[in-house]
Amino acid sequence: MKHIARKRFGQNFLTDHSVLDRIISVIQPEPTDSMVEIGPGLAAMTRLLLQGVNRLHVVELDRDLVARLKKEFDPAHLEVHSADALKFDFGQIPVAAGQKLRIVGNLPYNISSPLLFHLADIATRVQDQHFMLQKEVVERMVAEPGSKAFGRLSVMLQWRYHMDLMFIVPPSAFDPPPRVDSAIVRMIPKSEPLKCDQKKLEATVTKAFSQRRKVIRNCVLGMYTEEQLVQAGIDPTLRPEAVGLEQYVALANLEPVKTAA
């Protein structure tokens, strides 16, 4: 029976075999990898991954698809977790001694940002991540300071990962086709992120980009003084998108005047 894509789950199934093969060539799965796929859907990529790895874990929210996966695949090779990826504890997936998780998936665009932040919490246990995302989101992830795409997502993820946009995928590669281009992103956790408390950095960056049309002095008013901006190596007259990761970390490492409202 044909599965009808469900809008509430953000389902767009990748069907282009040339794109699938290209993704697999980027991931380069190995037999002993501890691999987990988020949102396997109709298992187009799942089947290809299973040609490379001995055992694969998948996390799927749609119960109808969970049933199909369990029916089609041998549980000795595919373990299906019926769960919401936003709430799923990826730390429970077993990893062989000396190994780390490899995470892949065609992520639902409607939850991509919160899911990326959820996964950042286990970055120390991850070897790499390869995701299909909306092209605009990937461009924001890898954006350089000074770009209009540079923002909170850029700073927080670049603090934790090395990231590269691998290639663009057109809407025609999916069924049903989305209204936007997609892109494959590679994310490799940094072994030694710049020293900073994550919550303080998050609060600082959120405050800075809350009014991105204003200069940063006005954006962080009430949280940091102009003198502190200068101390962190930041020109107070710059807009938030013109300030780099290192400067935001330096600012977050200073004691705020008070907690931002």
Image (tube, helix red, strand yellow):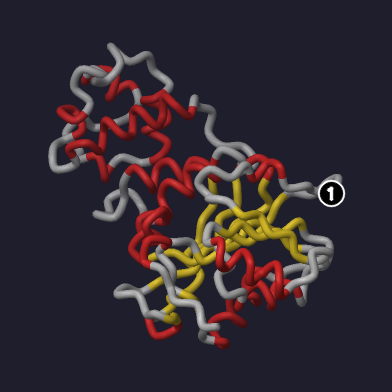
The residue sitting at 37% across, 80% down in the picture is: 177
- Mark 1 element type: loop
User: Percent position (x, y) of residue 221?
Assistant: 18, 22
State which quarter of the image contains the N terminus.
Answer: bottom right
87 lies above or below 22? above
Q: Is residue 218 left or right of residue 48?
A: left
Q: Nearer the viewer, residue 181 or 159?
A: 181
The answer to whether 145 is drawn above or below residue 25 in the figure is: above
Mark 1, other Cα within 10 Å: few <14 / some 14–19 / many ≥20? few
Q: Residue furthest right?
A: 97
Amino acid type indicated by mark 1: Ala
The residue pinned by badge 1 equals 96
Q: Is residue 20 above or below residue 27?
A: below
Residue 39: % across, % down: 55, 63
Most extreme residue toward the front, as rendered?
1
Residue drawn where x is 44% and y is 26% of the image: 199
The picture places residue 128, in percent across and down from the top left corner, at: 64, 55
State left or right for residue 229 relative to residue 255.
Answer: left
Q: Residue at horizontal 37%, vertical 33%?
A: 247
Residue 172 x/y as whole percent: 39, 85
